[in-house]
Amino acid sequence: MEPINVNQSISKNADFIEQVGIESGQPVHKCYQCGKCTAGCPVAFAMDYPPNQVIRMVQLGLKEELLRCNSIWLCATCSTCTTRCPCNIEIAHVMEVLRVMAGRSGTTPPGKAKNVELFYDSFLNTVEKYGRMFEVGTILQYNLKSKKPFNNADLGLPMFQKGKLKLGPSKVKNANEVARIFAEARRMEGGGK
Amino acid sequence: MKYAYYPGCSYHTSGKEYEASTRVVAKNLGLELVEIPDWSCCGATAAHGKSHLLNVALPARNLALAEEMGLDVTTPCASCYQQLAYANKCMIEDKKLKEKVNQVTGKTYNGTLKVKSIVEVIGSIAPEYIKAQIVKPLKGLKIAAYYGCLLVRPPKVTNFDDAENPMFLDNIMRLAGAETLDWPHKTECCGGSLAVSNLDIVVKMLNRIIKAAVECGANCFVVACPLCHFNLDMHQKSCNKMLGTSYTIPVFYFTQLLGLAMGLNQQDLQLGSHFTDTQKVLSMVG
Ligand code: SF4
Ligand code: SF4
């Protein structure tokens, strides 16, 4: 990270700091950087900023850096951090709020994180369409979007042989009710992707 | 006991052994599972990346349907369980959110239900009653009971015995006559759906878990989650291929082994559709 002027960043992004606090309901200011969250985080080794740094960056208002870091996408939402934080900060939930904010701001996740977002999108697209998640549809869409047409292909045949792949979706009778949930949530939250 | 049953989207694909074995075991333990009519996806593993409102509203539609049935909800999938329990808690604690979510779903959920994992439901049956059903004790099995994340964390949502060293799966397996091991990675995360987009990260996570179990002397895993199962069973091979390990440790759903001990039909328990060979270990039980 480039050297930063902390005072400037905090005052410039005061709104952002407040917004993370409101949306997550978490007392992020209480974090005293003990590092327990990071010590137990199973994905920290692959993140550009480990969980304790993410929380510190929220305190400092480093909005741009946070919205384009890979940590918020690689986070597996396992809640180990949340369970162990001595200040009762639900770090996993803060990660989630930052993810949603990044999506809203139209920030493209970097490197490895990009495919996580593509997977979420592919998954939810099948849910919006059929009312239930359709595995084959999700993977095909994901492969197409991530431009790796044969990604996960070596899983396909063995799964099919074991009867664990269904080529057609399991549909909800009132799938329109599920589509409505997506439409209404979008409308109420004002756009987004 | 009668429950509104939520199968979850993997019920006829990657999690089919879990679904099938849950149904027969429940039936033989006198539990009545009534499928929630026209249930839909709860959004687990993806909706939290998009929108909080969506993340609560997708499970809420199913809670509203279950409330019409007047039955508490249970589900085998740990991921669905967490998602339904979380939405339930959010809506019970936050009236404003509840109204907003009901507006989004177009259905009314009043927050009158409890959401329980099938592990909790089976675990709360009197131990003597379960013991009386055991006709083929699981002798010779050294089980690493693997809980993963979503069943036990965060404790505010899940409310199980102990978030760091849970015992409820161990207890059920011990009733079935198996030995379960004290091992350090019971609740370590398997990476979940990250396996689709970043397998290179996930094999490293899996390696830590499998290595710990093998070093503690386990000859099989027991799980209660289709995602954990998929990663540990299917991606054991990926782990071997990408990291040069040579693991061959079978991964069972707890319902499969409980059913086996209860003498239920092996075909119904679907013990043969795993990726890691189960025969060697199963032959120990006879
Ligand atoms: S565990 Fe809590 S207090 Fe400690 S560094 Fe992490 S967020 Fe801060
Ligand atoms: S929830 Fe995310 S940040 Fe927290 S320990 Fe798990 S992977 Fe790490």
Image: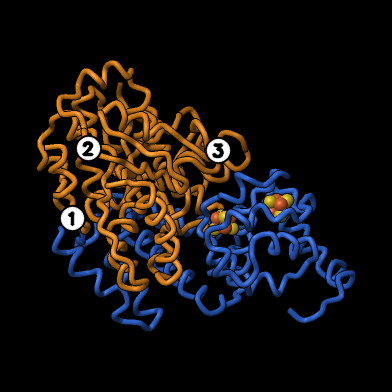
Q: Residues within 10 Å of mark 3 (few under 14, many from 20)?
A: some
Mark with earlier residue (3, 2): 2
Q: Is residue B170 left or right of residue B30?
A: right
Mark with earlier residue (1, 2): 2
According to the picture, the residue beneath numbered tag 3 turns out to be: B155
Name the chain letter of the residue that bears numbered label 1: B
Q: Give the Cα separation between the discs numbered 1 and 2.
A: 17 Å
Quadrant where the C terminus of chain B sits is top left
In the rendered structure, which amino acid carries the disc numbered 2?
A: Gly
Specify the quadrant of the image occupied by residue B32. top left
From where the camera sits, is residue A98 visible?
yes
Q: Which mark is residue B140?
A: 2
Q: Is residue B286 left or right of residue A166?
A: left
- Identify the residue at horizontal 33%, vertical 67% (top origin): B245
Q: Colour of chain A?
A: blue
Specify the quadrant of the image occupied by residue B255. top left
Quadrant where the N terminus of chain B sits is top left
Report helix, strand or loop for mark 2: loop
In the rendered structure, which amino acid carries the disc numbered 3?
A: Pro
Q: In the image as oriented, which residue stretches furthest toward the right?
A: A7
Mark with earlier residue (1, 3): 3
- Above or below A162: residue B158: above
- Identify the residue at horizontal 39%, vertical 56% (top origin): B211
Q: Give the Cα separation between the discs numbered 1 and 3.
A: 34 Å
Q: Give the Cα separation between the discs numbered 3 and 2.
A: 33 Å
What letter labels the chain drawn in orange?
B
**Numbered disc in front, either 1 or 2:** 2
